[in-house]
Amino acid sequence: MAKFSDFLEIDIRVGTITKVQDFPEARKPAFKLEIDFGHLGSKRSSAQITDLYDQTNLVGKQILAIVNFPPLQIGPFISEVLTLGIPDERGQVVLAIPELTVENGVRLY
């Protein structure tokens, strides 16, 4: 069993997607995202969310991401945060998003 203190070590924050690009070099279909985390600044993420989302409906969407994992090299791209999602019944990733708009950079508790 995990302790509450273990959960607190994972820093999950709200951010708004400001830029989306195709990521043709990724092994699985993915987008390159730029996400505004308010006082934490802008961070980049690779996200395998192309089944349910396209570039036009992602810009401006608030998402949840883990911001304190080490950066990960994915092909020629450095992913700085882990964008969170939940697989649906077909295995397609549904983004974890706040129900209402909140300030960018707010931490999930």
Image (cartoon, rainbow, N blue to C red):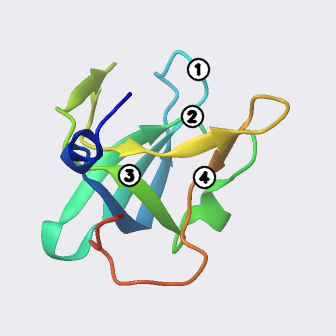
Q: Amino acid at mark 3?
A: Ala
Tag 2 and tag 1, C-beta contact below 8 Å:
yes
Based on the displayed image, in which of its 4 quarters is residue 76 positioned?
top left
Label 4 to label 3, Cα distance in Å?
10 Å
Determine which residue is flagged by label 4: 95
Determine which residue is flagged by label 1: 28
Crowd tier of the residue under label 3, counting other residues whose Cα lies within 10 Å: few below 14, some 14–19, many 20 or above? many
Is residue 18 left or right of 31 when viewed as pictured? left
Q: Foreground mark, 2 or 4?
A: 4
Determine which residue is flagged by label 3: 65
Residue placed furthest toward the right: 89
Sequence-first tag of 1 and 4? 1
Tag 2 and tag 4, C-beta contact below 8 Å:
no
Q: Foreground mark, 1 or 4?
A: 4
User: Residue 89 location, x and y as percent?
Assistant: 84, 34
The residue at the point 42 percent across, 51 percent down is 33
Q: Secondary structure at mark 2?
A: loop
Seen in the picture, residue 107 relative to 31 is either above or below; the reply is: below
Q: Amino acid at mark 1?
A: Lys
Crowd tier of the residue under label 1, counting other residues whose Cα lies within 10 Å: few below 14, some 14–19, many 20 or above? few
Q: Which quarter shows the C terminus?
A: bottom left
Label 1 to label 3, Cα distance in Å?
20 Å
Give the label on residue 48, or none.
2
Tag 1 and tag 3, C-beta contact below 8 Å:
no
Q: Foreground mark, 3 or 2?
A: 3
Tag 3 and tag 2, C-beta contact below 8 Å:
no
Label 2 to label 4, Cα distance in Å?
10 Å
Q: Which quarter shows the N terminus?
A: top left
Sequence-first tag of 1 and 3? 1
- Residue 22 visible somewhere in the drawing: yes
The residue at the point 42 percent across, 38 percent down is 46
The residue at the point 26 percent across, 71 percent down is 105
